Amino acid sequence: MRIEGLVFAVVAVFLAIVTPVYWFLSKDPTGTTALAVTFGLGAMIAFYFMLLARRIGPRPEDRHDGEIEELAGEYGFFSPHSWWPLAAGASATVVFLGLVYAWFILIIGLALAAIAVLGWVFEYYRGEHAH
């Protein structure tokens, strides 16, 4: 994680230098604000990665003597055939259409989104895949 932290630290330092120069040359408050926020986000991610690197130590890919076999193991569980992401996307579409056109469509979309989120979260608590 140390290398990743250094990459974001370099980005944050670059943006710390560029932001006042951009403001001085353009006097554009929107772009200056965007650059300042991007600096803050880069610095925050760099701080977190450096803190994490100190906490967990070097990973196999960070060491010169690291072997591929050290990374073997389970990466997690990924649902192979879930229809709930499609339902969540469709309900998000209805929510955004409700924001554009009418409040009652928004309410319908929020109800559909709640059903989709609950279905997605509790997908493996019932049926043939119950734990």
Image: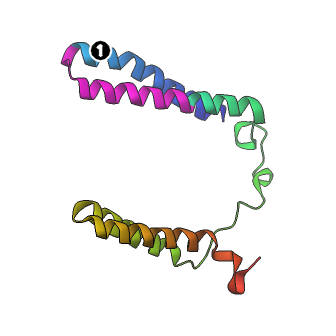
> Magenta residues: mostly which secondary structure?
helix
Quadrant in the rendering for residue 56: top right
Q: In the image, is residue 35 above or below residue 75?
A: above
Q: In this view of the protein, which residue sits in the foreground, 96 or 31?
A: 96
Q: In this view, does 113 lie to the left or right of 65?
A: left
Magenta segment includes 130: no
The residue where tag 1 is placed is 21
Three-letter code, disc 1: Val
Callout 1 secondary element = helix
Q: Is residue 4 left or right of residue 106?
A: right
Q: In the image, is residue 14 above or below residue 93?
A: above
Quadrant in the rendering for residue 65: top right
Residue 86 pos. (x, y %) = 45, 74
Q: Is residue 28 left or right of residue 63?
A: left
Magenta extent: 25-45
Quadrant in the rendering for residue 130: bottom right
Q: In this view of the protein, which residue sits in the foreground, 56 or 99?
A: 99
